[in-house]
Image (spheres, rainbow, N blue to C red):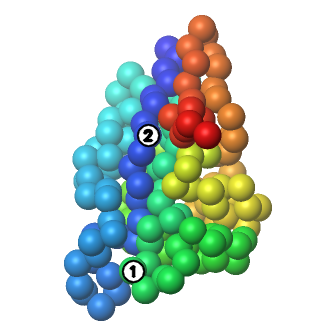
Amino acid sequence: MKLKLVVSDFHMGRGKFLPDGSFNYLEDFFYDDKFVEFLEYHRSGPFATADVELICNGDFFNHLQIDVNDPHPDLISERVASQRMAEIIAGHPEVFAALKRFAQTPLHRIAFTLGNHDPGLLFPAVIVKLRQALGENLQVKIGPWRFDGVHVEHGNQFFAD
């Protein structure tokens, strides 16, 4: 069995709560438990031996709106993007643990497509952080995915000039 799972626009930030315990109103992703359940389902039963690829089709992370105190959230350097990625990983520990288990399952892979909210994926240091968290069984792609007559790309490719 061969299966492609496509998810998009999670806009995952620093987590539901900030380190001081206050609510993080910049967070858009509140479905950690459901996504973990989704991943576990697709690595067990008939999927345990299937060829399964999870395609995170852009804006899986939110590198732009992560800190309310950041006066220039859209100015991103490699150092800033790497720090933001570390904060996202720390803010969603169950999701990253489940993604790692998924990627470690034989014949299972994870692929990330660049979206307009996760430009940090352009930086090698961010990819290193992701590989440290998830393992080597992942790929990052700038453009669209084409497979088996299917075309998948993130919608920001069609912004009007």
Indicate whether 148 appears above or below 111.
above
Which residue bears the numbered disc 2? 8
Query: Outermost residue toward the top?
Result: 149
Q: Please tell me the numbered disc located at residue 68.
A: 1
Residue 15 picture quarter: bottom left
Indicate whether 82 appears above or below 35.
below
Could you say which is closer to the camera, residue 110 or residue 12? 12
In the rendered view, does 121 fall on the left or right side of 92?
Answer: right
Q: CA distance from mark 2 to mark 1?
A: 24 Å
Q: Residue at x 44, y 68 (%)?
A: 65
Structural crowding at the residue carrying mark 1, measured as other residues with C-alpha within 10 Å and reported as few (<14), some (14–19) or many (≥20) = few
Q: Is tag 2's residue or tag 1's residue first in the polypeptide sequence?
A: 2
Residue 142 picture quarter: top right
Counting every numbered tag in the picture gives 2
Position of residue 99 measured from the top left corner of the image (x, y, whole percent): 47, 50
Q: Amino acid at mark 2?
A: Ser
Could you say which is closer to the camera, residue 76 or residue 92? 76
In the rendered view, does 10 fall on the left or right side of 4?
Answer: left
* SS at circle 2: loop
